[in-house]
Image (cartoon, helix red, strand yellow):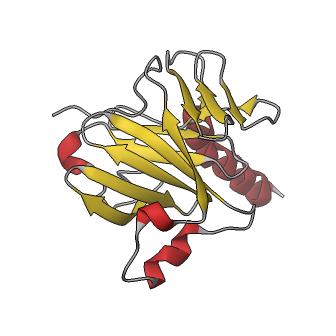
Amino acid sequence: MIRYTASVFLLIAGLTPAVAQQKKCEHSNIHAIFTASNGSDIELNARTGTIRLSHSQAVALYDCGNNTETCFTDYHGFAFSFSRECDKIGISRDPKNTKLTPEIVSVLHGNLWVVFDASPNFLFHYVVPKGVVGIYVGSTPSFDFRSLFHDHNVQIGTLNAVEYQITSDSDAVAACRR
């Protein structure tokens, strides 16, 4: 019984730092709105700790970032993580350095289109050093942008997805430092 209790204690103690780092967004000041041509929008509001996806209820948004990366998740299929240093965007495969490893779909002149295993229904358009400037949402809830890795002639403009672009009055999202 003592061995079992000690094992449970060690397990809980080992998990505590990971859970403590993933807190509701209480201290971040980011508020950004991404709009689509059809009028729907995505609102990422770290001030209130919520995210609202096109005409749905707002859900809790959690900050999983640290000093080296910006990271947000709702634990229900929306998540992204980018390095705070521009020269490290998309290159780290070390799980100790990033919580969510970006999978780069396409690159063009400082523009990256990135998908994460934690949010396969979203494709993030990232511009170095500006940050996330667009979010593509799959045409169906089961759409998986990771399927693009099998297409060697990916053309972002022809995707069967809704593109949401950041509005001019929004805060920068995950901008990096040079």
Residue at image location 65% in from the left, 23% down from the top: 49
Q: Answer with left or right where residue 124 lies relative to residue 162.
A: left
Q: Residue furthest front?
A: 38
Position of the N terminus by quadrant: bottom right
Q: How many marks?
A: 0
The reply to whether residue 17 is in sight is yes
Position of the C terminus by quadrant: top left
Residue at image location 47% in from the left, 50% down from the top: 124
The reply to whether residue 99 is in sight is no
**42 is higher (above) or lower (below) than 46:** below
Q: Residue 13: where, in percent of width, then height? A: 62, 43
**116 is higher (above) or lower (below) than 69:** below
**18 is higher (above) or lower (below) than 32:** below
Q: Answer with left or right where residue 108 lies relative to residue 159.
A: left
Residue at image location 59% in from the left, 40% down from the top: 37
The image quarter in which residue 17 lies: top right
The image quarter in which residue 35 lies: top right
In front of the other: 165 or 96: 165
Q: Residue 32: where, in percent of width, then height? A: 53, 25
In front of the other: 38 or 5: 38
Q: Residue 156: where, in percent of width, then height? A: 43, 63
In front of the other: 66 or 115: 115
Q: Residue 128: where, in percent of width, then height? A: 25, 42
Residue at image location 74% in from the left, 59% down from the top: 3
